Every structure is written in C-alpha cells, then in structure tokens.
Amino acid sequence: DGGITQSPKYLFRKEGQNVTLSCEQNLNHDAMYWYRQDPGQGLRLIYYSQIVNDFQKGDIAEGYSVSREKKESFPLTVTSAQKNPTAFYLCASSFEANYGYTFGSGTRLTVV
Amino acid sequence: GENVEQHPSTLSVQEGDSAVIKCTYSDSASNYFPWYKQELGKGPQLIIDIRSNVGEKKDQRIAVTLNKTAKHFSLHITETQPEDSAVYFCAAKRAGNQFYFGTGTSLTVIP
C-alpha cells in the first residue's frame, strides 16, 4: 500500500545532541514537508521541498536542517541549536498544488 | 500576519447530534480549504476539502461550506458517532502549496 512512513515513533534525546527523524514516502509525490505540532497550536511549517535536491525554510526553520537527495526521502535533523525541541513532528507529502497533504503518523521527540 | 482562526477549541455532543466547527481566514488569495481529522497519537487525515469556486460540498455525514466574502468556512458532521471523536483541523492554502492551519477542535461524542 502507498503511504508515508515516519520513524521512530518515539525518540528521546539528551540536551546538546543532534537527532535525525526519518520520513519516507512511496506515493510518488514531488513535494514533502515537515511540520511541528505543539499543544494548543496549529501546525507550524519547518521546511519544505518541492523537488529533489531543493528545499526551502518554512516559518520556524531555526535549529533544524533537512536534505532531499531522493524523491522518496526527506529526513529532518533537530540540532542542538533548537531551543525547545520537545514536540510532535509530522512529515507530509503532496502530489501537486491545490491538493491536500498525506501525513505520516508522526514522531514524538522528547529532550531529557 | 496571515492565519486561520478556528472555533471552538473543544466541543462535546451527544451521539446522533450534529457538530459544527468554524474557521476564519485572512489571506484573500486562499483558494483551497481542506479539513483534517487527527486521532490520538496519529497523523492528520484529510477528510474533506473545498475549493473557492463552490460554496458547499458534502460526503455522506460530513459537509463543508465556504463563504468567500466573509472569509469563513465550516465543517458540519451530522448523526455523530463515537468514532467521530478526534481533533479536527481546518486549513487554508497559502503560496507554494503550503497551508495556514487552525489550532484544532477536540470533538468528543458522548454515547
């Protein structure tokens, strides 16, 4: 079945460490996105990529980095520069403009 | 700045009653409005959407209405069932096929 897979589901990180969240899709979607979800807030865009080898900063890109070396994959690295990294992270993909997203099941990151 | 306001933040209804969630947007260029349902611990799932050239769209028990002049759109769920309990998000398209998202409505259907 086609879909978008995020791993791991839960992730714990010590302060000062970088951590990478995986996102893989087999929907043949060109565009992929990373959002952060915090309680009581709407989804906030971290980074997005509309095509392989190209990506742009979203609204809250500071402290995060991404790569898009393959169409299927869009990993997100949460660096030690991110001040409040504890959150639920959602990856999404879309076929083209004016279509909704397909979301992954999310990764809950906790800084300990 | 541009955003989407969503109300109410929580909503409880008796099973079989209707539920209505309202969103207001500010970006006059928005022309596509999806609604997502998010169950606990899962990612949001697209349940219905509407484009700016129509005023209403219905899919079984779910309907969405759009008032472009007033810049608001609403989700209507009729004959609610316990499995409708979830968090619902509205969204309005912005440039680059990105979206402004509402802050979510936690719907509880009481059996």
Image (cartoon, helix red, strand yellow):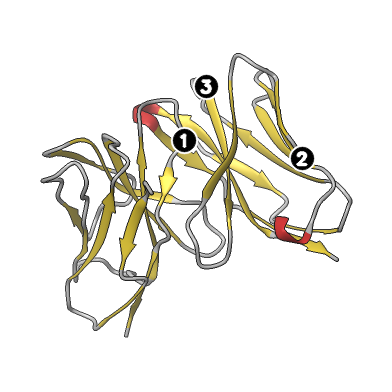
Q: Nearer the viewer, mark 1 or mark 3?
A: 1
User: Measured from the top left, where is residue A80 in percent x and y?
Assistant: 19, 71
Say whether mark 3 and mark 1 are on the same chain: no
Element assignment for label 2: loop
Q: Are marks 1 and 2 in contact (CB under 8 Å)?
A: no
Element assignment for label 1: loop
Label 2, residues with CA under 10 Å away: few <14, some 14-19, many ≥20? few
Tell me which residue sits at (69%, 56%) in the image: B9
Marks 1 and 2, how far apart at CA:
20 Å
Relative to A86, is B78 on the left or the right? right
At label 2, the amino acid type is Arg
At label 3, the amino acid type is Asn
Q: Are marks 1 and 3 in contact (CB under 8 Å)?
A: no
Task: Identify residue for label 2.
Answer: B61
Q: Are marks 3 and 2 in contact (CB under 8 Å)?
A: no
Label 3, residues with CA under 10 Å away: few <14, some 14-19, many ≥20? some
Task: Identify residue for label 1.
Answer: A100
Going from N to C along the chain, the mark reached first, 3 or 2, is 3
Task: Identify residue for label 3.
Answer: B31
User: Measured from the top left, where is residue B34 in percent x and y?
Assistant: 55, 35
At label 1, the amino acid type is Gly
Say whether mark 2 and mark 1 are on the same chain: no
Q: Nearer the viewer, mark 1 or mark 2?
A: 2
Image height of A72 relative to B68, above or below: below
Marks 1 and 3, how far apart at CA:
12 Å
Relative to B110, is A3 on the left or the right? left
Q: Which quarter of the picture shows residue A15? A: bottom left
Q: Nearer the viewer, residue B75 or B9?
A: B75
